Amino acid sequence: MDFKPNFFKITVIIKNLILVLFLIYSCANFADINKSELINLSDLDSDFKIDLRYATENNFTKMILYKNAVPLIQKPAGLALLKVNKELKKKGFVLIIYDAYRPLYVTKQLWDIVKDTNMRFFLANPAKGSVHNRGCSVDVSLFDLKNNCVVTMPSGYDDMTYRSKTSYKSKTSRENEMRDLLINEMLKQGFLSCSLEWWHFDYKDWERYPILNLDFSEIK
Ligand SMILES: [Zn+2]
């Protein structure tokens, strides 16, 4: 008996089966990627305080890295921030937004500017992209409505030292309380805290969104 034709057929069937399984797997993964739907936080709630530091020279690089910047974020994360703001208002605060969606080219600019490896520890490697590039991260702090000022935290924004850690204990207990209040309210609405930077939060579903390199002028 000659088994060669049957063996050949079985090989072809197995190859086709693998191809079909691969296509099913690819389609399933593709379906899991959420369509980018960046929204402007100011349109959601005009009570958010906006201070996009990289649109000004008031940041650690002393350079303007954004132009035409608006606080953009993926819609579900934006709606979650709206809830955080609502809860904070009951306590006399609102969120102040330092950064939200950040195009990939800006992440690369930051990486190129910062040569110090100790400082690069705080930055996202542009080879991997950051959650800011996916429109799912925000850098925030608290704004005191009664006293009309930004709340003092254990460190300033983008202070790349141990004082930025969420575990750091300031001698001023009020500073620790304010940081912990911010973190607790963000966690309640589905944000993940960053142990190195008290101001940075990723929205829980960030992996499902694509890395974007769209300039603000390209986004309606
Ligand atoms: Zn951040």
Image (spheres, rainbow, N blue to C red):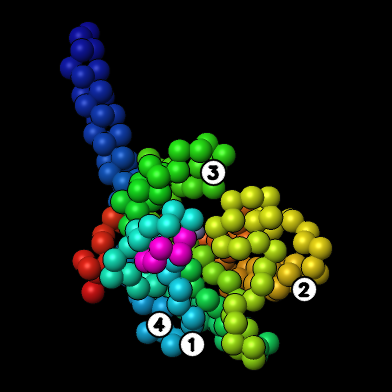
Where is residue 32 shown, x and y percent of the image? 38, 57
Magenta stretch containing residue 50, yes or no?
A: no
Disc 2/disc 3 C-alpha distance (Å) = 28 Å
Which residues lie in the magenta part?
55-59
Front position in the image: 24 or 178: 178
Label 2's element? helix
Q: Which of the two labelled residues, at mark 1 and mark 2, occupies the earlier sequence position?
A: 1
**Can you say whether 65 is above or below 181 in the image?**
above
The verdict on label 1 being within 8 Å of ligand 1 is no
Disc 2/disc 4 C-alpha distance (Å) = 29 Å
Q: Disc 4 marks which residue?
A: 42
Disc 1/disc 2 C-alpha distance (Å) = 24 Å
Give the image quarter of residue 178: bottom right
Disc 4/disc 3 C-alpha distance (Å) = 31 Å
Q: Please tell me how crowded label 3 is: few (under 14), some (14-19), or many (20+) other residues with Cα within 10 Å.
A: few
Q: Main secondary structure of the magenta part?
A: loop
Looking at the rendered structure, the kind of residue marked 2 is Arg
Disc 3/disc 1 C-alpha distance (Å) = 33 Å
Q: Disc 3 marks which residue?
A: 119
Q: Disc 1 marks which residue?
A: 47
Looking at the rendered structure, the kind of residue marked 3 is Met
Disc 1/disc 4 C-alpha distance (Å) = 8 Å
Report the disc number at residue 174: 2
Residue drawn at point x = 52 percent, y = 76 percent = 96
Mark 3 or mark 1, whichever is nearer to me: 3
Mark 4 vs 3: CB contact within 8 A: no
Where is residue 50 shown, x and y percent of the image? 45, 77
